[in-house]
Image: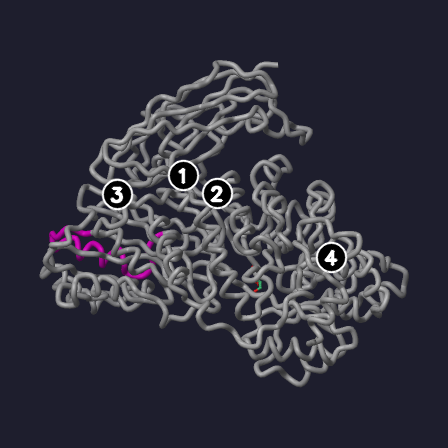
């Protein structure tokens, strides 16, 4: 019997992470803990940044000595297998290593970026996507992903907006739970499961001015109403781990934040997994001005509840001395070690001899990736130019992103390979035949400013019946440390679009980007605009399906698109203010300061409304919504209300429609947003088909935080909408009574 099996039989540590460990397991964990030296315990609380590839002599010695519990960024399966062999056969206690990795939106099969996945509004499909990623990663001996990212982001300047689910806590919470289920499967020791990590706890998405690693100031009521719910949902779904954020929230760095980690996460939510710091964020407690030196940082990290330190060396260097000096209670260390590994089913996972190659890029995984890419594309404009007729003569494919596998995959494609990507260009050629596609990139990259490719692009446009213009950002412009102060198309792309428009051919813009961009001028020149984000390995075939009507666009924006960066932060669930502008207070031409038309909460130089509201997305078909029907006009506290509307497909295409449920609490002791998402459903309707779509709301679903941080439903008047986006719909009214 191999040692890993032996150990497993000895310890029987086989259970899912979220369930309270059986007493038997607790006893065995106690037995192992009792045998561990303080150094070995600290080792289990430490994650090494790199093993070396092949595994370095230094790593070998350190693993033998029990110095590391986990590694990040290991490169090859062979390295992980070798390191695990050393841990199991050559270290004193044979405790297996835990291999973590940034499996953010797929492993080999790259799925659309998380923000794109959020645009599907399809938790079941997003769950399948996470499952695909988990299967592939686990086949390669990865145990743990640093995903999902659950930071609510209302500022597209922040580059990491691409890694999360956008601006809304309800949608983000639904997707958080779906991803945790997908990664972790039925239990962590099940084949193809990996541990999830809800990150970055918490408030990182609110960094001031969208500037990376900046500080966030979030009143507790906003924290509880908006920023915490996705994390809470992940915890309730059984997420095995959480990662503390780099940023400071209300002056206290998240990595040293006892209120958040011990108070909210462990205390209020009863989270019993473990918390890992972000990369070097324990050390950074000093830089923040929150810890005097590295020893103080280590002390504050452990006290706050960071069980494992990622990449930096503070725990190694200081915890032992802190215990010896009586400054740190060893019980806190035991508690951290107990959480770290024993609950991951790790002891029962035999080390695979070699990865099964059939798991990677399996046809069923590619099918999930293709569906995700198709469902995440958001049709922002269409005057009938789409779908294209299959009989179209020649198509000009222009733009720097038409044939760029890395950009198509997007940020965090650690294990994705360019050669696996089916690019937009390749797929269109496949579909139409190479002779019907005229390709002229116009610019070498999205940031290129040289215009020497313009003449060939113009010639291609002139020679074609329609133009597909691929614009956007390269994959390096979003993700970590990629904040922007401008949201427009970089390089000479706007100029390219203008030049192409002059050819007079129908232009369809395909925008490839990891964040909302501002691009009205080019959109105005186009007959259709499809926002495909970074759609991943299968983005090409999915786009071809959409362009030619084999699939109908059904994605909805998970985040508000501003008209201009000066409106940021802009989000649908804002408060009404004392002077809200009305629908006629719009229409101010961009860049032309005019009379303010009254002293209202708006701008004098741009419409105050967004370019595209949250929840927005067109279809090739059209849908009509009836007014909502309510099961009662008043509902007592503790009661339930059914809300239904008829949704009719009034167009020519069978299509999915995402039906959104919003409420507004008209009066409360703390004023409430003008709308709050409370439900959604994806329904498929044939042309002419009418379906009643209904939702049930309990009065608890209507609750909000009062000034004392109690989640309460205050009696009073409410509005409710069943609508295609956050801006449209016919309101219904009801009252909640005592
Ligand atoms: C990021 C995390 C990531 C970690 C490990 C950090 O810089 O903030 O999101 O999981 O690195 O790569």
- In primary-sequence order, the first of circles 1 and 2 is 2
Write the residue at 55% across / 26% down. Answer: 702
Left or right position of 484 against 508: right
Residue that numbered label 1 is attached to: 614
**Does 505 appear in magenta?**
yes
Query: In this orientation, does residue 611 appear?
Result: no
Write the residue at 52% across / 14% down. Answer: 634
Q: Which mark is residue 167?
A: 2
Mark 1 and mark 3 in contact (Cβ < 8 Å)? no
Q: Which mark is residue 339?
A: 4
Displayed quadrant of residue 144: bottom right
Find numbered disc 2 in the image and state the secondary structure of the residue it sits on: loop
- Residue farthest toward the bottom in the current orientation of the protein: 57
- In primary-sequence order, the first of circles 3 and 1 is 3
- In primary-sequence order, the first of circles 4 and 2 is 2
Find numbered disc 1 in the image and state the secondary structure of the residue it sits on: loop
- In primary-sequence order, the first of circles 1 and 4 is 4
Region rendered in magenta = 488-507
In percent of width and height, residue 717 lies at: 51, 17
| 509 or 394, nearer to the observer | 394
| 388 or 595, nearer to the observer | 388
Write the residue at 65% across / 54% down. Answer: 16
Residue that numbered label 3 is attached to: 381
**Dividing the image into four equal quarters, which quarter contains ligand 1?**
bottom right
Find numbered disc 3 in the image and state the secondary structure of the residue it sits on: strand
């Amino acid at each position: 019997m191999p040692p890993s099996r032996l150990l497993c039989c000895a310890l029987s540590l086989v259970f899912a992470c979220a369930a309270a460990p059986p007493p038997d397991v607790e006893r065995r964990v106690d037995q192992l803990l009792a045998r561990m030296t303080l150094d070995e315990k600290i080792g289990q609380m430490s994650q090494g940044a790199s093993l070396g590839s092949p595994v370095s002599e230094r790593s070998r010695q350190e693993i033998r000595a029990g110095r590391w519990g986990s590694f990040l960024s290991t490169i090859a399966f062979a390295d992980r297998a070798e390191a695990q062999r050393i841990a199991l056969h050559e270290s004193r206690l044979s405790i297996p290593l835990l291999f973590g990795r940034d499996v953010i939106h797929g492993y080999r099969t790259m799925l659309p970026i998380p923000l794109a996945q959020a645009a599907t509004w399809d938790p079941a499909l997003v769950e399948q996507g996470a499952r695909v990623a988990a299967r592939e990663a686990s086949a390669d001996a990865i145990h743990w992903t640093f995903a999902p990212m659950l930071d609510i982001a209302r500022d597209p300047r922040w580059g990491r907006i691409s890694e999360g689910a956008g601006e809304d806590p309800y949608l983000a919470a639904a997707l958080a739970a779906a991803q945790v289920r997908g990664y972790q499967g039925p239990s962590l020791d099940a084949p193809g499961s990996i541990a999830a990590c809800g990150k970055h706890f918490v408030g990182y998405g609110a960094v001031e001015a969208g500037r990376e690693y900046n500080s966030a100031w979030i009143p507790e009521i906003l924290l509880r109403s908006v920023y915490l719910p996705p994390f809470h949902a992940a915890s309730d779904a059984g997420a095995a781990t959480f990662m503390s954020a780099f940023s400071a929230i209300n002056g206290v760095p998240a990595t040293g934040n006892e209120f958040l980690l011990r108070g909210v996460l462990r205390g209020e939510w009863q989270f019993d997994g473990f918390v890992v710091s972000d990369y070097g964020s324990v050390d950074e407690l000093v830089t923040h001005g929150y810890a005097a030196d590295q020893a103080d940082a280590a002390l504050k990290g452990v006290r706050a509840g960071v069980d494992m330190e990622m990449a930096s060396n503070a725990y190694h260097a200081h915890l032992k001395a802190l215990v010896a000096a009586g400054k740190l209670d060893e019980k806190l260390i035991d508690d951290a070690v107990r959480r770290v590994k024993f609950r991951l089913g790790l002891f029962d996972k035999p080390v695979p001899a070699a990865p099964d190659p059939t798991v990677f890029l399996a046809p069923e995984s590619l099918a999930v990736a293709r569906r995700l890419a198709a469902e995440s594309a958001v049709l922002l404009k269409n005057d009938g130019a789409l779908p294209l007729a299959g009989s179209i003569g020649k198509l000009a494919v222009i733009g720097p992103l038409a044939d760029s596998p890395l950009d198509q995959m997007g940020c965090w494609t650690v294990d994705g390979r360019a050669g696996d990507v089916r690019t937009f260009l390749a797929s269109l050629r496949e579909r139409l035949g190479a002779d019907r596609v005229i390709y002229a990139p116009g610019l070498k990259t999205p940031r290129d400013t040289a215009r020497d490719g313009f003449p060939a692009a113009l010639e291609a446009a002139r020679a074609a019946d329609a133009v597909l213009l691929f614009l956007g950002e390269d994959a390096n412009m979003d993700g970590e440390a990629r904040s922007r102060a401008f949201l427009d198309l970089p390089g000479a792309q706007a100029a390219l679009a203008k030049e192409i428009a002059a050819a007079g051919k129908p232009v369809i813009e395909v925008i490839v980007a990891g964040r909302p961009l501002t691009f009205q001028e080019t959109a105005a020149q186009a007959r259709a605009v499809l926002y495909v984000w970074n759609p991943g390995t299968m983005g090409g075939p999915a786009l071809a399906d959409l362009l030619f009507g084999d699939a109908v666009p059904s994605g909805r924006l998970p985040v508000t698109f501003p008209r201009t960066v000066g409106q940021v932060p802009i989000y649908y669930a804002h408060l009404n203010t004392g002077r809200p502008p009305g629908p006629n207070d719009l229409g101010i031409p961009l860049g032309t300061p005019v009379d303010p038309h009254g002293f209202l909460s708006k701008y004098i130089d741009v419409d105050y409304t967004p370019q595209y509201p949250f929840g927005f997305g067109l279809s090739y078909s059209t849908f009509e919504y009836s007014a909502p029907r309510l099961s009662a006009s008043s509902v007592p506290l503790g009661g339930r209300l059914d809300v239904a509307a008829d949704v009719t497909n009034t167009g020519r295409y069978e299509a999915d429609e995402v039906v959104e449920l919003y409420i507004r609490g008209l009066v409360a002791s703390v004023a409430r947003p003008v709308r709050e998402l409370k439900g959604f459903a994806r329904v498929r309707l044939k042309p002419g088909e009418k379906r009643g779509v209904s939702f049930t709301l309990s009065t608890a679903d209507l609750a909000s935080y009062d000034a004392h941080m109690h989640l309460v439903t205050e009696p009073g008047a409410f509005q409710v909408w069943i609508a295609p986006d956050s801006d449209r719909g016919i309101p219904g009214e009801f009252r909640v009574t005592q």
